[in-house]
């Protein structure tokens, strides 16, 4: 039988039943997509390789434990695992969440990806929901500026006009919103996924 015709769900079942080759086919089939996703977040080949390996170690452990029940949605499940490991990587290296030079909150790089395939969309929705929940905890004036900037994509000039405050005040509120968001995340020890 041609391997490419075997659906993921069958390969998962075969692997769980002890057919080691089935995992090899799954890894080969999805390696490019998962590897590219991880690389698009960390921009480092060695780290990407490590996270990719860790992803499949976790996949193997979960399958061997009999704890997999995604009913044929193998790839989105693996993408979620890799996404969680990317976040773990940033937390361990204490690079998340922090400011980068553009002054934006690093997690929003996940949200601003215009070429979203189905797996990325699932992850984007998860992260967006988590971020929105955290944003609700901010003081009203900071929340307003953050939502206008991130979700409405307004410039600070436009935010200043809409809110009736100076551009510097709008910038200050954005900065405090990001600082407070980081404090909220640290306080709750939150990982930004489900």
Image (cartoon, helix red, strand yellow):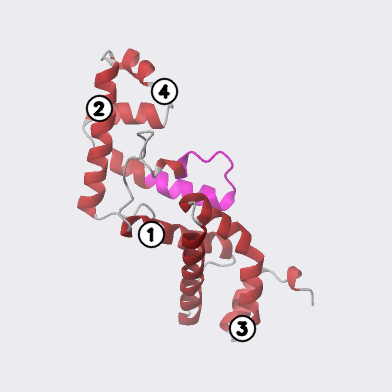
In the rendered view, tell whether residue 9 sits above or below residue 115. below
Q: CA distance from mark 3 to mark 4?
A: 52 Å
Tag on residue 89? 1
Q: Which residue is mark 4?
A: 154
Q: CA distance from mark 1 to mark 2?
A: 29 Å
Q: Nearer the viewer, residue 76 or 99?
A: 99
| Mark 3: few/some/many CA within 10 Å (<14, 14-19, 20+) | few
Q: Is the C terminus in the top left, top right, bottom left or bottom right quadrant? A: bottom left
Where does the image place residue 19, in percent across and percent down from the top left?
Answer: 63, 85
Tag on residue 173? 2
Total numbered badges shown on the rendered structure: 4
Contact, CB < 8 Å: mark 4 with mark 2? no
Which label lies toward us, 3 or 1? 1
- Pick whichever of labels 4 and 1 is earlier in the sequence: 1
The magenta region covers 110-129
Which residue is drawn at the image coordinates 74% and 68% (left, top)?
Answer: 4
Where does the image place residue 116, in percent across and percent down from the top left?
Answer: 57, 44
Contact, CB < 8 Å: mark 2 with mark 3? no
Location of residue 164 by image quarter: top left
Q: Is residue 49 left or right of residue 131?
A: right
| Mark 2: few/some/many CA within 10 Å (<14, 14-19, 20+) | some
Q: Which residue is mark 3?
A: 20
| Mark 4: few/some/many CA within 10 Å (<14, 14-19, 20+) | some
* Residue 68 visible in the current orientation: no
In the rendered view, tell whether residue 29 sits above or below residue 193. below
Query: Residue 114: within the magenta?
Result: yes
Which label lies toward us, 1 or 2? 1
Q: CA distance from mark 4 to mark 2?
A: 14 Å
Query: Residue 126: within the magenta?
Result: yes
């Amino acid at each position: 039988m041609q391997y490419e015709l075997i659906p993921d769900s069958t390969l998962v079942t075969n692997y769980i039943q002890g057919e080691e080759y089935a995992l090899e086919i799954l890894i080969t089939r999805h390696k490019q997509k998962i590897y590219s996703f991880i690389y698009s977040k960390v921009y480092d080949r060695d780290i990407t390789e490590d996270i990719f390996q860790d992803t499949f170690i976790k996949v193997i452990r979960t399958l061997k434990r009999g704890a997999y029940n995604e009913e044929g949605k193998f790839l989105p499940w693996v993408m979620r695992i890799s996404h969680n490991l990317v976040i773990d990587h940033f937390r361990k290296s204490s690079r998340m969440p922090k400011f980068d030079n553009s002054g934006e909150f690093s997690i929003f790089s996940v949200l601003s990806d215009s070429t979203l395939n189905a797996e990325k969309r699932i992850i984007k929705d998860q992260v967006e929901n988590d971020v929105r929940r955290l944003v609700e905890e901010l003081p009203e004036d900071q929340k307003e500026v953050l939502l206008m900037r991130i979700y409405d994509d307004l410039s600070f000039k436009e935010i200043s006009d809409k809110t009736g405050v100076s551009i510097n005040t709008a910038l200050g509120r954005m900065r405090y919103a990001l600082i407070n968001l980081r404090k909220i995340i640290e306080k709750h020890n939150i990982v930004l996924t489900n």
